[in-house]
Image: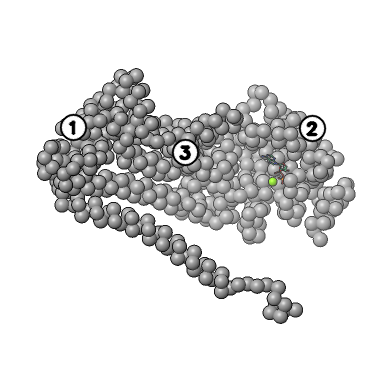
């Protein structure tokens, strides 16, 4: 019997094709909305700030007079804070991830730890700021220093680094662990020679992305160091400091047009730093992937 | 059931049972594996061939809820005795897995891996070359030792895994369906290699391919599983006997069923 004569199938070819087209259209509109919003933001920021983005803007301290103001202290503050945040958060993050994936027993306690870790990654950043203020600034008496700011940001990014590192550790094929064990490697050797090298690209990428999130954070740093008028570059972790988002926030909140332009110039600098960090992360990921992929 | 205990037997199990949690995967296996012979483990999937194999180098220790009962003797010593270090055992009883699993490192580093973890003090280059020659891979890779192992074909990768196991100079090599992921030509190369290697090593091979067992093995063990009980050993004898004149009707049914 033939399909045509009996009509067992009603394939609706035409209406299926139309529905497919409609869905394609919706997706296209969605992506356009995103790109348009981003494009508008960029165009506005660049047109406001471009002409203010001069060498003196990068190499001068903040000032009451917009044409003399620069963001050098904020740039260097950000560099200091990021370096220290990385030094604190990355090793602790890797260690925690290794413990949770390779050593921790699978019991109730570990489940609770895991759930809370995921929750911590979602806690608003101002909460970390207040925690850092209470613990580092007052209780440990570190003061409103770059060190206190870095420790606070390290706490903020730690859950993200742990989650990314665990993902990377989990992605190392079990077959590689088994192969190493079967050759007479012990647990430490398996972790050092197989798991860590295998997870390294993922850990690196996750850490850079987590740090680039920390660079843009203003709220927790405001809680630690409310200062903007810093007319020196931190020379030690115990110096006072400011960072780029705070400087930008301060300029934006002033009424004068010129400060709005300064803020736009600051945003351009911040965006350049962020985009280069993300580009670095992508570059490293691709580099290691092509080296180790099948 | 034949229980071939002789002074030459390298591995001896008695009343060996394995549980995964409360699930009985393997029940009361008694068998003796002779030195410099190839012993094949055959049987339907799920009958516990891999489980049995992993008892021999204590890989089951890595599965948290696996429990091994009964005895395994390795050169007369209790393999599960308290003075035995499973890490050391695994360097003396090597293993090759079903799917080739080279590390994402260079060919050289793959072979050198076991040497490094076991603190080899000799010349690394020479040991790597020796192992690759033993695995009949040297001629194919000698000019690209620094290349990633993942650039090799599946059959070459599996021979690399064999070279990697050999480099550590084990007494026994366990192979879990080493050719099941390979094409027929690569499979023949592996079988040829296994026949060569038994001069120097004792080999236990799991295979689901009965012609393969017939081609390479001196002894063959047939395992089965049914719903009422876990996997168990039905018959263990010389390969020629198992394939031409098995004593157990279940062995005959299995072998003829697969051959026809
Ligand atoms: N890690 C494990 N946890 C629980 N059950 C397992 C595990 N490994 C194997 N099994 C079970 O044990 C039985 C025997 O498995 P296996 O030894 O892999 O059989 P074979 O290699 O003969 O196919 C199967 O029923 C399998 O599902
Ligand atoms: Mg198996």
Q: Residue B192 at x, y = what percent?
A: 66, 53
Is residue B160 placed above or below B73 in the rendered structure? below
SS for dot 1? loop
- Is A241 on the left or on the right of B56, as rendered? left
In this picture, residue B79 sits left or right of residue A194: right
Q: Position of residue B151 (x, y in %)?
A: 49, 55
Are the residues under badges 3 and 1 in a single subunit?
Answer: yes
On the rendered structure, is B170 left or right of A207?
right
Residue at mark 3 = A163
- Residue A186: quadrant of the picture: top right
User: What residue is at 31 percent from the left and 23 percent from the top?
Assistant: A137
- Judge: label 2 CB < 8 Å from ligand 1: no
User: Which residue, given by chain and number where applicable, does mark 1 sit on?
Assistant: A230
Q: Quadrant of residue A5?
A: bottom right
Circle 3/circle 2 CB separation < 8 Å: no
In the picture of the structure, the residue carrying the numbered disc 2 is B15
**Nearest-to-viewer mark from 3 and 2:** 3
Residue contact between numbered discs 3 and 1, judged by CB atoms under 8 Å: no
- Across and down, in percent, residue B72 comes to 73, 32
Mark-to-mark CA distance, 1 and 2: 78 Å
Name the residue: 62% across, 39% down.
Answer: B94
Does dot 3 land on a helix, a strand or a loop?
Answer: helix
CA separation in Å, label 3 and label 2? 45 Å
């Amino acid at each position: 019997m033939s399909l045509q004569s009996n009509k067992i199938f009603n394939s609706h070819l035409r209406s299926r094709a139309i529905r497919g087209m409609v869905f394609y259209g919706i997706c296209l509109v969605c992506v356009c909305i995103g790109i348009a919003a981003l494009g508008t933001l960029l165009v506005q920021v660049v047109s406001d700030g471009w002409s203010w983005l001069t060498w003196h803007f990068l190499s001068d301290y903040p000032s009451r007079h917009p044409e003399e103001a620069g963001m050098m202290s904020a740039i260097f503050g950000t560099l200091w804070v990021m370096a220290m945040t990385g030094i604190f958060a990355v090793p602790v993050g890797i260690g925690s991830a290794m413990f949770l994936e390779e050593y921790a027993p699978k019991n109730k306690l570990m489940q609770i730890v895991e759930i809370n870790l995921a929750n911590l990654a979602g806690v608003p950043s101002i909460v970390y700021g207040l925690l850092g203020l209470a613990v580092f600034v007052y209780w440990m008496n570190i003061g409103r220093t770059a060190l206190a700011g870095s420790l606070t940001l390290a706490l903020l990014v730690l859950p993200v680094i742990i989650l990314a590192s665990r993902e990377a550790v989990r992605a190392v094929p079990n077959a590689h662990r088994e192969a190493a064990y079967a050759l007479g490697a012990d647990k430490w050797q398996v972790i050092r020679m197989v798991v860590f090298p295998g997870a390294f690209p993922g850990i690196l990428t996750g850490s850079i992305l987590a740090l680039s999130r920390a660079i843009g954070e203003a709220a927790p740093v405001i809680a630690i160091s409310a200062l903007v008028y810093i007319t020196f570059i931190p020379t030690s972790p115990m110096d006072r400091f400011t960072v780029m988002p705070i400087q930008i926030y301060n300029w934006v909140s002033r009424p004068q047009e010129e400060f709005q332009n300064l803020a736009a110039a600051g945003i351009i600098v911040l965006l350049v730093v962020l985009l280069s960090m993300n580009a670095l992360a992508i570059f490293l990921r691709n580099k290691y992937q092509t080296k180790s992929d099948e | 059931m034949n229980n071939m205990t002789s002074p030459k037997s390298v591995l001896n199990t008695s009343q060996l049972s394995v549980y995964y949690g409360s699930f009985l995967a393997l029940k009361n296996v008694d068998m003796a594996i002779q030195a410099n012979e190839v012993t094949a483990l055959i049987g339907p999937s799920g009958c516990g061939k891999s489980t049995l194999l992993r008892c021999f180098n204590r890989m089951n220790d890595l599965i948290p809820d696996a429990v091994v009962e009964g005895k395994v003797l390795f050169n007369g010593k209790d393999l599960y005795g308290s003075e035995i270090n499973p890490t050391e055992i695994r360097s003396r009883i090597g293993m090759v897995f079903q799917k080739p699993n080279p590390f994402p490192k260079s060919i050289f580093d793959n072979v050198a891996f076991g040497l490094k973890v076991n603190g080899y003090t000799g010349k690394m280059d020479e040991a790597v070359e020796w192992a690759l020659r033993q695995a009949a891979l040297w001629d194919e890779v000698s000019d690209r030792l620094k290349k990633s192992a993942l650039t090799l074909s599946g059959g070459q990768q599996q021979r690399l895994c064999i070279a990697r196991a050999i480099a550590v100079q084990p007494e026994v090599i366990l192979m879990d369906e080493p050719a099941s992921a390979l094409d027929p030509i690569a499979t023949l190369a592996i079988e040829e290699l296994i026949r060569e290697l038994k001069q120097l090593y004792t080999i236990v091979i799991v295979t689901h391919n009965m012609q393969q067992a017939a081609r390479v093995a001196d002894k063959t063990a047939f395992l089965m599983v049914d719903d009422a009980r876990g996997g168990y050993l039905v018959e263990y004898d010389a390969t020629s006997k198992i394939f031409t004149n098995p004593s157990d009707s279940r062995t005959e049914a299995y072998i003829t069923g697969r051959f026809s």
